[in-house]
Image: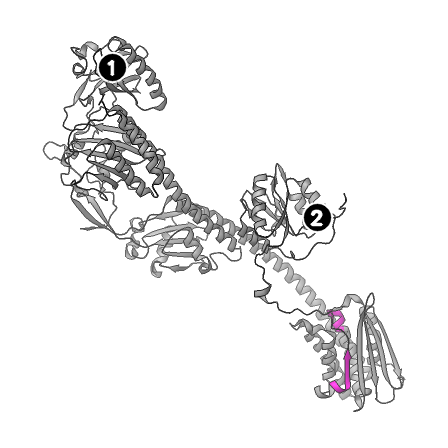
Amino acid sequence: MTTEFNLSVAPVDCAQEPIHIPGTIQPHGLLLGCTLPDWTIAHVSANTSSFLADVDPQSLLGRPLDSVLPIETVHSVRNQLQTAMLSGSAERLDCLALDDSAHRYDMTVHMVDGLAVIEAAPSVMGAGANGVTLLRGLAGRLRRAPTVQRLLTLAAQQVRAVTGYDRVMIYRFLPDESGEVVAEAVRYGSDSYLGLRYPATDIPAQARELYRRQPLRLIPDVNYQPVPILPGRSPEGLPLNLGLAALRSVSPVHIQYLRNMNVRATLTVSLMRGEQLWGLIACHHSEPHYLSGALCSAAELFGQMLSLQIDVREQQQEQQRVTDAQHAHDQLLEAMSPRDTVFEDLNRYAGMLHSMIACDGVAVWSNGRLNGEGVLPPDDAVGELIAFLGQKPVDRIYATSSLAEHFAPAASFADLASGVLAIPISRVAQDYLLFFRREVIQTVTWGGNPDKAVQRDPVRGTLNPRSSFEAWRETVRGHARPWTTSELRVAETLRVALLGVILRRTELIASERQQAQDSQSLLIAELNHRVKNVLSLVLATTRQSAQQATSVEEFTREVERRIQALASAHDQINAPAGASTQLRALLESEARAWIGRDELDERIHFSGRAVTLDVRGYQTLALVLHELMTNAAKYGALSVPEGQLTVSWQLVEGRGLELEWNESGGPEVKPPTRRGFGSIVTERTVPFELQGDARVEFRPEGLFARFRIPPQHVSLATEQPQPDVARARPASPIAGLRLLLVEDSMMIALDAQTMLEDAGVKVEIAGSLSDARRALRLDPFDLVILDVNLAGETSLGIAAELEAEQHPFLFATGYGARTAIPERFDQVPVVTKPYNLSALGYAIGQLPGLGRRRERSPLTDNRGA
C-alpha cells in the first residue's frame, strides 16, 4: 500500500475517551483518602475488608486514621506526605503494617485536592534485593555503552533480567506523536516488536500527560474486576481524583488492547528529557506478575537514571553537531568580507555551508535570480516558491521537511526539494539563502494497520482497539529528512551573522560611493588645472618660437618638435612601468629622436646612478634636455660625425641632483649675439620651475652646462624584483612576532599566551591600561591586541594613541564583532573571544607594516621612566 500524507494517522477521535474508569481501582490493593489536617478518612476502597479483617468499609468513613492503622504506620505516612507535597508526585514506603498481623504492605502517599491519598498493596517478600541489583548493574553497564542505541538495548536487557517480564521494550515518541520500538529484550520464542511504529492514538495526549506526571504504572493482572471508591463522589459532587494513584483502574480500551496482544501484566516506566516525555520502558508478561514496592522504586529510579543518560548522550551528540557547525560558521565569517559574500560567490563558500547544515543543494536568491549548486528545484518553479516564501515573516527562518503540504506546486518536484530551509537576509529586496533536501522515500513498518488502530462499535458505541498487530508496511513519500533543532539554531545564528555582513557591505558601499564622488570632484578640478597649464605652455612655446623663426616652415618645425617633446614627457610620466620616469630613460628618448641606436652608444655617453624624477621635475627637464639635444644636433657636437656628448649626474646629500652636459669634437662654439627661446628655456626653466640652479658656458671646444635639481624632485630608483612566493611565504602569518596582549582575564590571557607561543609568537601580557602603557614605554612590540572592555574601562583611548603613532593593533572583544567600537576604527580588524589561532592569524594578516619596527614615539620614548 502506498500513501502520500502525514505519518500521524488518527482516524478515531479519542481525546474525550477516559483513560481509566473513574472512581475505581485495581483490586490488588486498598485505598484511603483523608482530609487534612485532622487525618479523617473521607474515602475508602470497597475491598478494605480483604486487607483489614472483619472491617466494614463504610464504618471507616469519618474515623481518624490513627484509629484504623498502627501508630507507627500513620507516623511514617505523615512524614512521607511532606516529601510528596514538595515533589508533587506520589512517594513510596516499604513493608508497613496495616494491623497486628504479620502481613506487610508497600504503600504510596500523595496529595490531591486537599486530600492525602494512601494506597497499600501486599509486599512481595524476598524481592527487595533485586532493586539494588538493578541499580548497581545500571551504573556499570551504562558507562560502557558507546552509543545511545547500545545504551537502550542494555537498559532493556537489564530491566528484563531483574524484573522477570517476558518482554521489555524501549518505546520512543516521534515528532508527530507516533511511537516506535527502538530497543527490546524478549523471552525466547516470543514475537518481536523491534522497529515497529505505532500511531499516536495508541497512547493519546491525556495518557502521555499522566505518564509525564506519574513515572511508574503497574498492572499486575489485566483480568481484574474494578473496585469502587466509597463514597463515589465528594460533598461537592466530584469523584476522587485518581490521576496520581498507582492503583487506579485502566481504560477498558487499553485493557482490551493488552488482551489482544496476549499481555496479562504490564509495567510502564516514563523516560523524560527535561520536562518532555521522551519515551517509555514498556514491560509485558503473559501471566499475572507482581513486583515489590522496593523493586518498583528501583525501576522508577532506573528510569530517571536512564533518562539522564539519554539526555546527556543526545546532548553530547547535538553539541558535537553544533560544534562542527560553529567551526564551519567561524570559517565562513573569517573567509567572507563585506565585498565578497555568499551572494557574490556562492561556489567559494558552498562547502562551508554544507558543513554547517547538511543538504542536497544550496542556493541564493538575489536581484531576481537564483544562483546555486547541488540539487535544486526546476527553474520554472523558483518564482512561485520565492513568492510563497515572501508571504512568511522576514525576521525569522522558514523550515519544513514536507514542502508540498504547505506549497502545493512543490509536489511536482518533491524528488528534488521536499525539504527547504529559507534564511531571509533583507526586509525589502527579499534576498534568501536557501538549503534544499531531496525526498526520502520511507517504508514505515507499523504494528498493525494504523487506519484501524481504534474503531467504534456501531451498536454499543464503545471503542474497540485493533486485534491484529502483524507488521503492516506503508510507503511514505513527499518527506525529506527533518531539520533538527540544532540545525535550526545554526541557521538562526547564520542569519544574524549574514545580516551583519550585509549591513557592513551596505555601509561600505555608501562610504566608497561618497569617497568616489569626492575623488571625482578633486580629479576634475586637478584635470582642469593641468589642462590649463598645458594649454598655457603650448601657447607660450608657440609665441616664443614665432619670435625666433625666419620662415613659416621653420616655425612649424620648431613648434612641432617642442610640443612633441612635451608629449613624450607626458607619455613617459604616465607609462605603467616605474622606470619610465628615470632620468636615463628621458635622455635616451631625446637622443633617439636625433641619432640612430647604433650610433647613439658610440657618440653619446651617460653615467650616473639610476634616479627617478617626480612629475614636475620630469616635465621641466624634458623641456630643457629637448632644447640642449636639439641645439647639439643642429649646431653642436652631434651635428658632425666626430662629435661627442657626455652627460653625467650624481646625487649630492642636501643639494639634490647635479647634472653636467659636456659637448666636444664639434664645430667651434661662439657665444650667441642674441638670446633666443632655446637659451631662455635652458637657463631659466630649472630655476623658475624647480627653484634649482642652471649655468650654461659657451666654451670653444663645446657647450657645457650644469644643473642642480632640488632633493624634493628626485630620488634613487630602486628595483622591485618579484619575490619567490613559495620560498618567501612564512610558515605562519604570525610566527616570529612580538605581541602585547592587553587582557583583564588572567585565565583567558594565559590560555591565549600558550596558544600563541606554540605558534611561534612572543607574548607579553598586560592586565590594565596602565600596565599596557608601561609595557609600550619599556619594550618594542610588532603588534598590540586590545581587549575592548578592561574591568569597567575601555581601551579606546590607548587605541587612539596607537593609531596616531601608526602602530599596528587590533581589537578583541567578547561582545558582538563591533559592539562598542566607534566608527573611526572601522578599518581596525576585530577578533571575537574566545581566541582562535586561525581567526587571529587572519586578522593579523590584514594589518600592513608588521615587518618593520617602529621609530621611537611618545608611547615608546623615555625607556628609563
- Numbered circle sitting on residue 779: 2
Q: Position of residue 349 (x, y in %)?
A: 46, 57
Residue 612 included in the magenta stretch of the image: yes
At mark 1, the secondary structure is loop
Give the residue at x 66% y 46%. Answer: 799
Residue 663 image position (x, y, % from top left)? 83, 84
Give the quarter of the image for residue 583: bottom right
Q: Residue furthest bottom?
A: 641
Would residue 103 appear left or right of 496 to someone viewing this image? left
Residue 279 in picture, x, y percent from top left: 29, 37
Tell me: 193 left or right of 557. left
Separation of residues labelled 2 and 1 (CA atoms): 84 Å
Q: Which residue is mark 1?
A: 97
Q: Which mark is residue 781?
A: none
Tell me: residue 222, above or below residue 185.
above
Measuring from the top left, give residue 176's x and y in whole percent.
Answer: 28, 42
Judging depth in this view, the residue of 647 and 636 nearest the camera is: 647
Label 1: few (<14), some (14–19) or many (≥20) C-alpha neighbours in 10 Å: many
Span highlighted in magenta in the image: 601-619
Instruction: Determine the residue located farthest toward the left in the rendered image.
Output: 459
The first of marks 2 and 1 along the sequence is 1
In this rendered view, identify the residue nearer to me: 327 or 827: 327
* Mark 2 crowdedness (10 Å alpha carbons): few <14, some 14-19, many ≥20: some
Q: From the image, which quarter does the C terminus lie in?
A: top right
Residue at screen point 43% across, 58% down: 368
Kind of residue indicated by mark 2: Asp
Asked whether 427 falls inside the magenta stretch, the response is no
